[in-house]
Image (cartoon, rainbow, N blue to C red):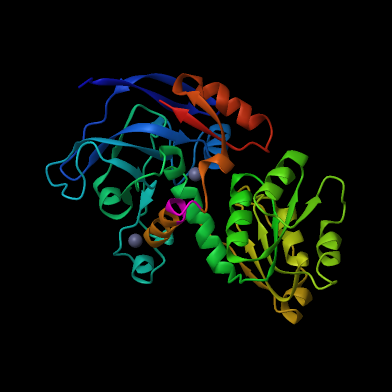
Amino acid sequence: MNTQMLAAVLYGKEHLQVEPVAVPEIGDGDVLVRVKAALTCGTDVKVFRRGYHARMIIPPAVFGHELAGDVVKVGSKVARFRVGQRVVAANSAPCLECFYCRRGLENLCEDLLFNNGAYAEFIRIPERIVQRNMYEIPAGVAYQDAALVEPLACVLKGVEETGMREGDNVSVIGLGPIGLMFVRLAKSIGARVIALGRRKTQLDRAAALGADELVQTMDSHDPVGAVHRLTQGRGSDVAIEAVGKPHTWELCVQMVRKGGSVNFFGGCPSDSHVSLDTSRVHYSEITCRASFHHTPAHIRRSLELIRRRVVTAQDFVNREEPLQNLLEVMRHLMSHNGHLKTAIIP
Ligand SMILES: [Zn+2]
Ligand SMILES: [Zn+2]
């Protein structure tokens, strides 16, 4: 086997290079995967713009985290996988021993192990992920569909934590791939979805995924009023923030009915703050929560949704590019929001 491969190396702010590097060595419990599809993600764009991510990636480092591919080598202790299998691996695995893991909050693990390097011909999947967060791709599921498992697991967790039910009015503000996944899952539960977004193309995609009402936030200076008008003046049962801006966090709190629940799903720039009307939160009993990342159980349930084709790449990936074009792809994704995912084919 080759000892060199092509991989994207992140060097810092808006600085990455696709260059030859050594094929990763694997340990006894690790697996080497030939990447067949790696999907771009808003987090990668954020990391590319900033040049690092305190928890997930410190440059120089190989880059990318949503992938599916073929097992090409297994460590001597690996029993669950064999060469030739099609697999999908999550980007992290919890320790299962710390304070948080023991309480079932594995997403908050004090020793969450992150893995990067999906934008490459080969990636090493470390033992802990092999054991806890890697799966064979079910028959009939394409690599690009399977590679959605990680972002979908985050969204699934977010949906569950709002407690949304059939027949609920669910507002989703922010219609990037994540917001659109919320639209899809809320529809699959039988909710009435009010999709709020800036661009017509995004609203069209939300409609195609089943959104019942569309509110263009550029025209409407009053998205909160629009949601109230669409819900007999009550406000929606649930509001999901999938933008990651303090202002839209605040709007979500105003958008829900008495007893409603808000999920601040979009992460805002560090050191940002929001201001909330305390009487509204208190006297209207608004539940505010924020969902972050995923747990192994959510990865499993997410793969099951993909197997049942509740979510497919067709709706979330609209471009394919060779690895060599990654820099151009990242610049393009950075230029403005409103893109779907691009599948990078190494
Ligand atoms: Zn991602
Ligand atoms: Zn832990």
Q: What's the residue at 75%, 79% (across, down)?
A: 284
Whether residue 183 sits left or right of residue 292 in the image: it is right
Instruction: Give 131 or 49, whichever is nearer the viewer.
Output: 131
Residue 271: percent from the left, percent from the top?
63, 51
Main SS of the magenta part reads helix
Quadrant for residue 102, please give it.
Answer: bottom left
Q: What's the residue at 61%, 38% (across, down)?
A: 340
Quadrant in the picture for the N terminus: top left
Q: Does the magenta segment cover residue 306?
A: yes
Q: What's the residue at 86%, 65% (across, down)?
A: 229
Q: Is residue 20 above or below residue 134?
A: above
Q: Is residue 274 visible?
A: no
Q: Does the magenta segment cover residue 241?
A: no
Instruction: Give 206 or 334, whichever is nearer the viewer.
Output: 206
Residue bounds of the magenta highlight: 305-309
Instruction: Give 181 or 294, whichever is nearer the viewer.
Output: 181
Q: Is residue 260 visible?
A: yes
Q: What's the residue at 23%, 21% (across, down)?
A: 3
Image quadrant, ligand 2: bottom left
Residue 342: percent from the left, percent from the top?
54, 32
